[in-house]
Image (spheres, rainbow, N blue to C red):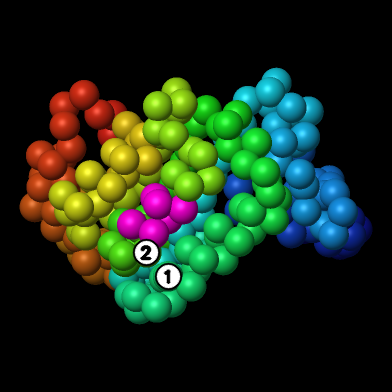
């Protein structure tokens, strides 16, 4: 490669985001004390409607290709503390619960939302209800799931939150490839998860 061209590439190089956000994250702005008021944010950018993403970072094991913000943990107390922190943040940003009334779509991502300890998930549902979020107000609800650990209790809990769609991490059907990326997944896990989900629910394969 031409040295001048290589120098130009290096000069203009900058690290990018893992995902494509618009506007770019470096252009995001907050309100007082570095956080946005959810109600004003919703009205200003979303036409009076709100879209809530809840990040649940826990996983049972680490896939070696993963670039998400996760933590390998099945510790009940740690999961409960995380949910407490989530609710505290929500109360800070929406002290009067007015923004949650505008929420029309909900996404649970991670991590693997179905890696969250059942007691922590139960607490999250209870707190969101207390704050005023009702499943009936949602026009769309999506949860990412790990088919290896998807069980009836998670399906029922997600349905309580208004989840009707699922994104399921298949990754690959080749056992050797799954082994190489530390994805301990069998066809049986996928089949069981598909059978568990009712036919009227939509599944996205990732």
In this rendering, position of residue 39 left or right of residue 26: left
Residue 165 drawn at (x, y percent): 33, 33
Residue at the image point whose x is 33% and y is 57% from the top: 122
Within the image, what quadrant is residue 194 found in? top left
Q: Name the image quarter holding the C terminus.
A: top left
Residue at the image point whose x is 48% and y is 73% from the top: 81
In this rendering, position of residue 117 left or right of residue 156: right
Tag 2 near tag 1, CB within 8 Å: yes
Q: CA distance from mark 2 to mark 1?
A: 5 Å
Q: Nearer the viewer, residue 88 or 162?
A: 88
* Mark 1, secondary structure of its residue: helix
Residue at the image point whose x is 65% and y is 36% from the top: 98
Residue 188 drawn at (x, y percent): 8, 52
Residue 181 drawn at (x, y percent): 33, 67
Labels 2 and 1: the sequence-earlier one? 1
Is residue 129 visible in the rendered image? The answer is: yes
- The span shown in magenta is 122-127
Residue 49 in the magenta stretch? The answer is no
Rendered position, 76 above or below 114: below
Label 2 Cα neighbours within 10 Å, binned few <14 / some 14-19 / many ≥20: some
Q: Nearer the viewer, residue 126 or 141?
A: 126
What secondary structure do most residues of the magenta stretch adopt? helix
Rendered position, 93 above or below 100: below
Label 1 Cα neighbours within 10 Å, binned few <14 / some 14-19 / many ≥20: many
Residue 73 drawn at (x, y percent): 38, 76
Residue highlighted by disc 2? 120
Q: Which mark is residue 80?
A: 1
Q: Name the image quarter holding the N terminus.
A: bottom right
Q: Which mark is residue 205?
A: none
In this rendering, position of residue 123 left or right of residue 32: left
Is residue 187 visible in the rendered image? The answer is: no
* Mark 2, secondary structure of its residue: helix
């Amino acid at each position: 490669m031409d040295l001048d061209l290589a120098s130009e590439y290096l000069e203009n190089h900058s690290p990018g985001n893992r995902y494509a956000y618009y506007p770019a994250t470096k252009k995001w702005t907050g309100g007082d004390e570095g956080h946005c008021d959810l109600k004003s944010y919703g009205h200003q950018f979303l036409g009076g409607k709100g879209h809530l993403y809840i990040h649940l970072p826990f996983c049972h094991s680490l896939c070696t290709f993963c670039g998400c913000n996760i933590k390998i943990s099945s510790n009940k107390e740690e999961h409960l503390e995380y949910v407490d922190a989530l609710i505290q943040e929500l109360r800070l940003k929406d002290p009067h619960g007015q923004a949650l009334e505008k929420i029309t779509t909900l996404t649970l991502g991670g991590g693997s939302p179905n890696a969250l300890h059942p007691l922590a998930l139960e607490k999250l549902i209870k707190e969101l209800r207390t704050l005023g979020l009702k499943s009936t107000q949602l026009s769309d609800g999506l949860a990412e799931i790990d088919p290896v650990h998807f069980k009836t209790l998670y399906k029922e809990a997600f349905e309580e939150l208004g989840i009707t769609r699922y994104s399921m991490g298949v990754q690959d059907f080749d056992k050797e490839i799954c082994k190489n990326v530390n994805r301990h997944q069998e066809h049986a896990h996928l089949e069981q998860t598909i059978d568990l989900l009712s036919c009227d629910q939509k599944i996205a394969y990732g």
